[in-house]
Image (cartoon, helix red, strand yellow):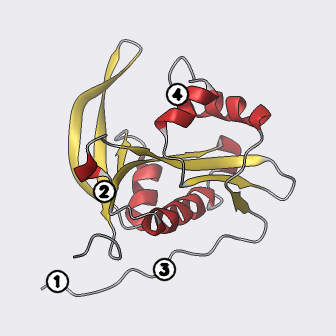
């Protein structure tokens, strides 16, 4: 028998971590290069055009160093999918294991609901179990595996498709 339980709320950001919308231009390119696991990184203009103008966060430590970022991309230009977005979360290797990803994802979820987003999706490489656990801990569920959906270099890659349906938006 299935119990009707609610997940506990995600923790509030820690005091030593500042989550902000603003990122100085000089850091944008470096962060994009660091986040890209391919062989190139997009220009700031390309990245900016491909992500929603709202729901962008940068995590900074007390000294102003970038620890990670999170943003949303539209999944389709069709209006019926206007409340559906793809999640991108990047955490610097030096900041992993410190709750940065959890705080960024919590901020992204909260902000996305304020902008009328009803479903968030994430495509994650199957071996990235840390990211899968992060998303599952934030209420995402695995809905499938997309086989050979991407190509990195000469290697075809599968991704796990996870999604989170809002309990506050799109419930009518």
Label 2 secondary element: strand
Which quarter of the rendered picture does the C terminus lie within? bottom left
The residue carrying mark 4 is: 37
- From mark 3 to mark 2, how far is it between C-alphas? 18 Å
Query: Where residue 4 appears, x then y in whole percent?
Result: 24, 87
Sequence-first disc among 4 and 1? 1
The residue carrying mark 1 is: 2
* Direction from residue 167 to residue 20 in the image, left or right: right
The residue carrying mark 3 is: 9
Say if mark 1 contacts mark 3, CB within 8 Å. no
- Mark 3: few/some/many CA within 10 Å (<14, 14-19, 20+): few
Depicted 57 relative to depicted 115: above or below: above
Name which quarter of the figure residue 27 lies in.
Answer: top right
* Direction from residue 127 to residue 79 in the image, left or right: left
- Mark 2: few/some/many CA within 10 Å (<14, 14-19, 20+): many
Sequence-first disc among 4 and 2? 4
């Amino acid at each position: 028998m299935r119990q009707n339980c609610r997940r506990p709320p995600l923790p509030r950001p820690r005091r030593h971590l500042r989550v902000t919308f603003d990122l100085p231009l000089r850091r944008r390119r470096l962060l994009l290069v660091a986040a890209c696991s391919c062989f190139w990184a997009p220009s700031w203009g390309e990245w900016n055009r491909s992500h929603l103008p709202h729901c962008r966060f940068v995590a900074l430590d007390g000294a102003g160093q970038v620890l990670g970022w999170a943003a949303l991309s539209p999944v389709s230009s069709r209006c019926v999918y206007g409340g559906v977005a793809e999640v991108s979360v990047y955490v610097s290797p030096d900041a992993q294991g410190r709750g940065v990803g959890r705080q960024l994802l919590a901020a992204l979820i909260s902000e996305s609901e304020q902008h009328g987003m009803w479903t968030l999706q994430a495509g994650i490489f199957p071996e990235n179990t840390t990211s899968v656990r992060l998303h599952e801990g934030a209420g995402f569920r695995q809905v499938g595996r997309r086989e050979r959906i991407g190509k990195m270099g000469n290697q075809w890659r599968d991704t796990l498709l996870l999604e989170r349906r809002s309990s506050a938006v799109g419930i009518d």
